[in-house]
Image (cartoon, rainbow, N blue to C red):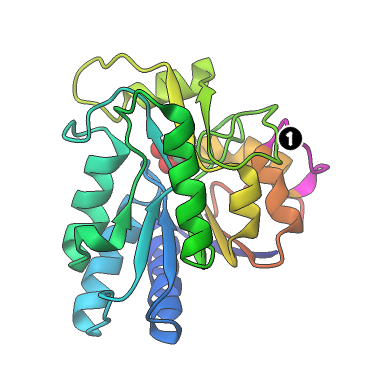
Amino acid sequence: MEIKIFDDYERMSSAAADLIIDIVKRNPVAVLCFATGNTPVLTYKLLAEKAKEEKIDFSKCFCIGLDEWLGVSPDKSGSCHYTLYHQVFRPLGIKDSQIHLFNAMTKDIESECKKMNELIEKVGGIDFLLAGVGVNGHIGFNEPGADVSLLAHDQELHDTTLSSGQNYFSEPTPIKKGITLGMAQVMKARKFLLLANGIKKAPIMKQALEANITNNVPASFIQQHAGGIVILNKEAASALSK
Ligand code: PGA
């Protein structure tokens, strides 16, 4: 695992965008998995700008979504689906045929998970996965206490996730459960980029990076990820001792 600390949100986001550009330059057929949330917003904006400037071709990449709020329609602005289309796929010119996201409206969660698991196998695994971290240490919707051997699964969400989740929606939205790639898939991604921004992430980043690896802090598993990269700003890194 590698840790990179930047002065501010702008610099860390620029470094994260550069990293994605570099991956796609080296491997134009890369399988990319993206998270949503506040943290990667600027990364995605800069990625779109840099990709345009540098004429990076995403037309052969394949994109997967990390997670989704179950029961939230894809046309709702806080859904992961809507967010990824607006922040990543449309700006980069990525077509529907290059994308697979969880269907939040499914009545058959088991087959939705199976579809995702089989697809990941079929495309040869994930080359690059970007995730933020919850203040409770979750990765995607792998909440504290997660079974880290799981593949895609549905998950009851913790109160902290439900209350911070509401902030993504412009109006109160009933959310209760999520569907997510499992930690087994996160850990198998060839590169796993974890982003953390701001002082409110400082305590959990200390636990994730300096305490023992535990499923009570799913983000701590990045410590044993050979392709793990943590990009933080100074505030999020401010509790780290080294
Ligand atoms: P945030 O969320 O980027 O909005 O802080 C991260 C997460 O909960 O995974």
Q: Quadrant of residue 188?
A: bottom right
The boundaries of the magenta stretch are 210-217
Residue 9 in sight here: yes
Can you say whether 142 is above or below 171 in the image? below
Q: Is residue 134 left or right of residue 2?
A: left
Residue occupied by mark 1:
215
Residue drawn 54% across the image and 47% down it? 235
Q: Is residue 180 left or right of residue 192?
A: left
Please tell me which residue lies in front, 193 or 11.
193
Tag count: 1
Can you say whether 225 is above or below 212 in the image? below
Q: Is residue 1 left or right of residue 112?
A: right
Please tell me which residue lies in front, 140 or 64.
64
Please tell me which residue lies in front, 191 or 15.
191
Residue drawn 45% across the image and 77% down it? 23
Q: Quadrant of residue 135?
A: top right
Find residue 115 and report its horizontal and vertical position in percent: 44, 45
